[in-house]
Amino acid sequence: MYLNEENIRKDFPLLSREVYGKPLVYLDNAATTQKPLCVIRKMEEVYSTINANIHRGVHYLSRQATESHENARRTVQRYINAASPEEIIFTRGTTESINLLAATFCRSQCKPGDEIILTTMEHHANIIPWQIQREITGVELKVVPLTKEGEIRTEDVEELISSRTRLIALTHVSNVLGTINPVDEIIRLGHNYNIPVLIDAAQSVQHFPVDVQALDCDFLVFSSHKMYGPTGIGVLYGKKNLLEKLPPYQGGGEMIAHVTFEKTTFNELPFKFEAGTPDYAGSTALGEAIRYIESIGLDNIRRQEEQLLRYATERLLSIPGMKIIGTSQHKSSVISFLVGSIHPYDMGLLLDRFGIAVRTGHHCAQPLMNALGIEGTLRASFAFYNTEKEIDTLAEGIERVTKMF
């Protein structure tokens, strides 16, 4: 392995606990990651030393909290290499980021009959907001099919493009298949037709470097809690010239410049999209999580997780009846699988009794499951703090459950 497992795992207190009298094997990182002590302590520090409403106060605590929040915005800007902190909008997470964009983009940039292109492998968070807008604004949805390996092809995206296409929205990494999509190719394709592209990076920014200027994506979204930060906060990145064209998503304090009963003028970016008191403790802790990731090094994290993925794939495929769902040559650290005729829920329940935490079900991707002709899968998802020994424990647990059936 590439990182010192023992030292890394000391940073994450929850990993040392037991479940049902057995050491916890936490393999549900695609759902949420565990938090290092520095992030936990940063949350405590904010509430115990500088807690005050931000942007509106002239007193010391308010100025300190404001500085902490805006420093976090600049940290996010640096992490994804955005051109300006004004392009970083804090939200409650990936889901709210996409809802914000879907509502404001369709309302201001689309007419009935205009088209949004999605892919079959999208998380519900990148499907349902566009369906809601279909009912409200009359936009139509087109869906890119998958290959048998669980990949999308750029030429299949191009076949769906028409004069009515207004946006392409796709995931960077599938939360079910682990497929890493060729987003750079699709962004170039979209721009050849003057179509902006949204990237759902909820499953990528914690695993390998993502540079929004190098990709030239128009919008990008992700969540803090999947990258070792707190829950309830995330990011919408957008190119400044595009964000300026969009109307506000919510109204209230902070997002205004001047209010009368006759008319309201709106604040500048990024505040136009941040109505109400923001989660400044969450943003500060997200900044701390990013610094922690950077201290480990994204290249080191990628190498570690690629090794875990290779080891887990080989180990699981040695189990009779094992079927891995998603066999792209370009994958991140997710393995979805079925074993014989055993229902994923039954397998997941029994693995839990061995202290092994995996995900079961459709993983908020029912259209993908329908396309695959299955109801759901088990999913093991890895972070750099996982070990080959834990993968052995998972495999041994699957083998024990299989014998029960």
Image (spheres, grey):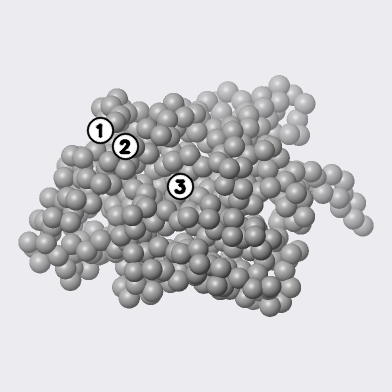
Packing grade of label 1 (10 A; few <14, some 14-19, many >=20) is few
Q: Is residue 34 above or below residue 151?
A: above
Could you tell me the amino acid type at mark 1?
Answer: Met
Could you tell me the amino acid type at mark 2?
Answer: Gln
Residue 98 in the image, given as x and y percentages of width and height: 59, 57
Residue at the image point whose x is 40% and y is 47% from the top? 32
Foreground: 237 or 375? 237
The Cα–Cα distance between marks 1 and 3, rounded to whole angstroms, is 21 Å
Residue 43 appears left or right of 36: right
Foreground: 204 or 377? 204
**From the image, which quarter does the N terminus lie in?**
top left
Q: Secondary structure at mark 2?
A: helix
Residue at the image point whose x is 63% and y is 32% from the top? 74
Q: Quadrant of residue 132?
A: bottom right
Question: Which badge, 1 or 3, comes first in the chain's sequence?
Answer: 1
Name the residue beneath numbered marker 1.
Answer: 1
Question: Which badge, 3 or 2, comes first in the chain's sequence?
Answer: 3
Question: Which badge, 1 or 2, comes first in the chain's sequence?
Answer: 1
Question: Do callouts 1 and 2 mark residues in contact (Cβ within 8 Å)?
Answer: yes
Packing grade of label 2 (10 A; few <14, some 14-19, many >=20) is many
Residue 180 in the image, given as x and y percentages of width and height: 42, 53
Q: Is residue 28 visible?
A: no
Name the residue beneath numbered marker 3.
Answer: 204
The Cα–Cα distance between marks 3 and 2, rounded to whole angstroms, is 15 Å
